[in-house]
Amino acid sequence: MDIRKLQRAIVDGLEDVKAQDIRIFNTSHLTELFDRVIVASGTSNRQTKALASSVREKVKEAGGDIISTEGEDIGEWVLVDCGDAVVHILQPALRQYYNLEEIWGDKPVRVKLAANTGFTGARPSEPIDGEDEDELDAPAVKKPARKVASRRSAK
C-alpha cells in the first residue's frame, strides 16, 4: 500500500474519534522497519482504545494490513503496527513523559487535518498531494499588518 494512502487512512481514523495533537514523522532515514511514526493523544483509556480500533478499521477499509496492536488491555499507551507506519496513541501525561517526538521527530510530515486547517510539524519532508516540491522550499511571504485607525484619531 502507498505510504501516503496509509498515513491518510490512519489520520482519518484518528480524526474520526477526535484524537488530539496528531503528529506524523518520516522515519525512513532512521530505520528500515517502518517509514512513518504517527503520535496522537487520547484523553482517557476508553478513547485511546476507540482510537486504535478506528485506525485498524480505516486501514483495513483502505486495503492495508494490521500487523499487531499492543497495550489495548490497559489503554494508557496503545501501539498499532500498520507495517510501514507505527501509530502511538498515548494519554497526555505519558506522551509528555516519554516524549516520542524527540526520538522520531526530526523529519515531520505535513498533512492537512480536518479539525485544524494548519499542518503538523514545522518543516515538511514531502509535499502534500497536489503540491509541488518547489513550493515547500520557497520562503513564506509575510503580509504587512493591516492598520486600523484608533477611535481617538477618528474623533
Image (cartoon, helix red, strand yellow):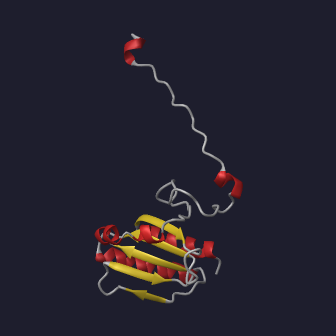
Q: Is residue 113 left or right of residue 74?
A: right
Task: From the top left corner, tell me how far across and down residue 12 is, in percent.
Answer: 51, 70
Q: Residue at x 52, y 83 (%)?
A: 82
Q: Is residue 48 left or right of residue 12?
A: left
Q: Is residue 154 above or below residue 95?
A: above
Q: Is residue 96 left or right of residue 134?
A: left
Quadrant where the N terminus lies? bottom right
Q: Residue furthest bottom?
A: 67
Q: Quadrant of residue 29?
A: bottom right
Q: Is residue 58 above or below residue 112?
A: below
Q: Could one spot residue 80 in this view of the protein?
A: yes
Camera-side residue of 155 and 93: 93
Q: Quadrant of residue 61?
A: bottom right
Task: From the top left corner, tell me how far across and down residue 114 is, in percent.
Answer: 50, 60
Quadrant where the C terminus lies? top left
Task: From the top left corner, tell me how far across and down residue 35 is, in percent.
Answer: 57, 77
Q: Could one spot residue 17 in this view of the protein?
A: no
Q: Is residue 33 above or below residue 47?
A: below
Task: From the top left corner, tell me how far across and down residue 113 is, in percent.
Answer: 51, 61
Camera-side residue of 20 and 140: 140
Q: Residue at x 59, y 79 (%)?
A: 62
Number of marks in picture:
0
Q: Residue at x 56, y 61 (%)?
A: 110
Camera-side residue of 141 and 59: 141
Q: Residue at x 60, y 63 (%)?
A: 125
Q: Is residue 14 above or below residue 68?
A: above
